[in-house]
Amino acid sequence: MRRFQMPPQILRLVLLTLAIVGSYMVARVFLTPATFGQYGWYRGAALEELAARTPVYAGKKACDECHSDILHKLAGDAHKTLSCEACHGVSRTHADDPDILPVKLTGSHCIRCHEANPSRPAWFKQIVVKDHYSGKCTECHIPHQPTQSP
Amino acid sequence: MTSEVTNIVVEVLPRFEGYVYPNEATAHPLWGFLIVLYPYITGLVAGAFIMASLVRVFKVKALEPVYRLSLLTALAFLLCATLPLLFHLGHPERCYEIMITPHLTSPMAIFGFVYAWYLMAVLLLELWFDYRQDLVEWSKTTAGFKGIIYRIFTVGVTDVSPPAVALDVKMGRILSVVGIPSAFLLHGYVGFIFGSIKANPWWGNAIMPIIFILSAIVSGIALCVFNYMVLTWIRRHTVEMRCLDTMAMFLFYALLVDAAVEGLDWIHRIYAAEEGFSVMQTMIREKLFYTLNLGQATIGTLVPFLLLGSLQLLRRRVPEMVRRRMISASAAMILIGVLAMRWNVVIGGQLFSKSLRGVMGYKMEFAGVEGWFMGILLLGLPFVILTVLVKLFLSERLPTSGHTPHGSSTT
Amino acid sequence: MKTQFNRRGALARLGGILAGVLALPVARTAKAAVQRVFVSSGAARGYDPSKHKWLMCIDVNKCIGCGLCAEACKKENGVPEGPYFRTWIERYIIPKPKPGSGQTRGETLVDSPDGGMHGFPESPVPRDQIEHSFFVPKLCNLCEHSPCVQVCPVGATFDAPDGAVLIDPKYCIGCGFCIQACPYGCRFLSPVTKTAEKCTLCYHRITRGLKPACAEICPTQARIFGDLLNPVPDDPIQKFYEQNRVQVLKPYLGTAPRVLYAGLDKEVR
């Protein structure tokens, strides 16, 4: 009885194909990152790695720990929506170590928002600085309670 | 961190008109000349393969002299097809990820598999079955380094009995039949990479893959004509006019279909005149004026169309010498024109803002990864590989076996 | 015949190895799937990404174009200098039509010098000739069907379970496909890391219970950040979409953004 014999070139190709597919499968096991597929088609560990960075801005809550009196004043007036760091600058170092003082503020900071600009919404308080007053803003306005005068 | 960054990044503000998103206002488009070359080279591969299939599947006997040359051309270009992609990556060392964790909703992820399939399961196999009988013979008669190479390529199979050879021919034909859809897949998906970007009105287009396939066939046949002419010139052979005329005929009809479909695309764009139409008009009138109107339309389509078309009508009356010149010139112009077409698609799609309110400028540099130098190098490399392949596998000093691609013997 | 037989044996053995190899990654994934909360040292411990759904609402009528958000974003995330922005502000100036032109409005001017992070220069159109003018903050639109995630070839960018669209900087190959696919121009290829970068919603902040830097710093609360799964008392997010008719950018692309705008104009894209 004649047994079926695979032609030599086909057999060689089948073996080669198996070897290639096999090494691909082996490579896949070793090269697929450990957490790949944890949540979806990506490296699950990436979420934690992205979350691991230290925040730069401390946030209003951090300020509230020591300066709740000022925050209370702020909350009662027109600047209640402002974050402390919007004017005082990045203050994480100050929040971590109160001895390091945040940047000293200047009046130019006020006009960043309040300089008149036709693109700004009409409800927003705006002034034309050169027609308004040449001195310091804080001579007439209290930044934490802008509707009151010193 | 910020100060370090300032030192590293030297930004030359590019010229742009109107409004572009801040992230788009970079000095160079994200995808530069390398990505122009990538669809160009894959297109040449697909086209050269289709050209070879004409012999094997459709039994166009007149084209037999270029059968092996077109397969080797396809191989030489396919070996280089990944290089432009690899070089343009931000992290080339991570390229293996595309095979290990391919994200199957991405057209680009399929690339690794389509490429591997096409290279190993189609092209190399077809070449191997076609060459097996010769390889066995050459490995016996050739000494030295070349002999070792032939021996390696036989993969240790030395059976050249008539049934084994008959099987080779049969397998080769099957592979050719499988190869045609594979070639379409290889290049159609390249078109889909662009056609699937709905964010970009220049690219996002359902017939983009078809346009890419058709222009690929045109450029591939043109490349085979070009290579055939160069090879006969170097070897001081006489050109087989029957073969050349047949190639010119297929080139003409491929160009006809390609031009018709591309024309249809343009008519649709102009007639529909959707949201981004005005910004596209600016592009065509200013940014892409030369590459589109002169390169793609005139040099790449109109002139070769007239030259090849007139040959179809008046073939008998045109002297051989003139015919040869006309066909070679058409092939060369088509090769330039298709490159211009790839440029218009890839670079053109990045010369306007996705806000559709402005256009960017692009001036190619000489040096750098996306520069002229690199581009010319990458375009030259396949020809170097092809020279080596021709020396190894199309050498005049080697005896060739009697069988022809579709099984009947020639005398 | 004998060699043939041996080969068959080898084939069978090879097949067995293959089957084992195929099963291995699956088993490992199944094991990993049990753990769902953050445990690593740097991150906020106990954060469960499946228990949140973040979104951002933007009230165009409240934006004053101060640029603090764009500046804060660069500082918070170490975004490279130059034309690289995770968030930015656009200024739209729509002039009045020329008399007798038969138009409702003149040709719209849009600009965003330096992403608006240092504010805006004086309007090129005098105030009395402006019909409408406003600022539009832009950021990642948090698409429900994100085209950027769809096209990433390796799974380096993804929709996190909590709704943030993130990029794995250790896995991104820097091909730029996602940047091409984003209809909103929110991504860029970082010249420093050579990977794609984008707004992460300040993932390191929101997992710690802080607001993203832009929403934290915005003086007028034009940007409202919130969690759809954990409404707070008197939720500003809830209020926002109850009180406003909201729009998204480029809705015809079917990306279904979760960044909702109130007060947009047709010129904004």
Image: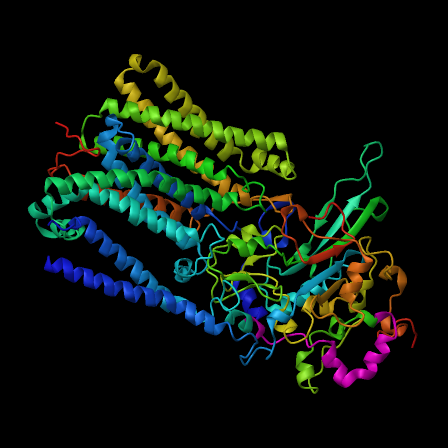
Horizontal side of A146 relative to C252 (left or right) equals right
The answer to which of B334 and B256 lies nearer the viewer is B256
Question: Which residues fall within the magenta stretch?
Answer: A50-79
Pick out the residue farthest to the top. Answer: B317
Predominant secondary structure, magenta span? helix
Q: Could you tell whether A28 is left or right of B32 in the image?
A: left
Furthest-front residue in this view: A1
Whole-percent x, y for residue A92 in the image = 67, 79
Between residue A15 and residue B242, name the one nearer to us.
A15
Above or below residue C253? Residue B3 is below
Q: Residue at x 82, y 46 (%)?
A: C130
Residue at the outermost right position: A149
Q: Does the magenta stretch include residue C227?
A: no
- Residue B347 horizontal/vertical position (percent): 51, 43
Q: Nearer the viewer, residue B182 or B191?
A: B182
Quadrant where the N terminus of chain C is found in the figure: bottom left
When asked about the image quadrant of residue B309, the answer is: top left
Q: Which residue is drawn at 42% across and 34% down?
A: B215
The quarter of the picture where residue B161 lies is top left
User: Does residue A61 belong to the magenta stretch?
Assistant: yes
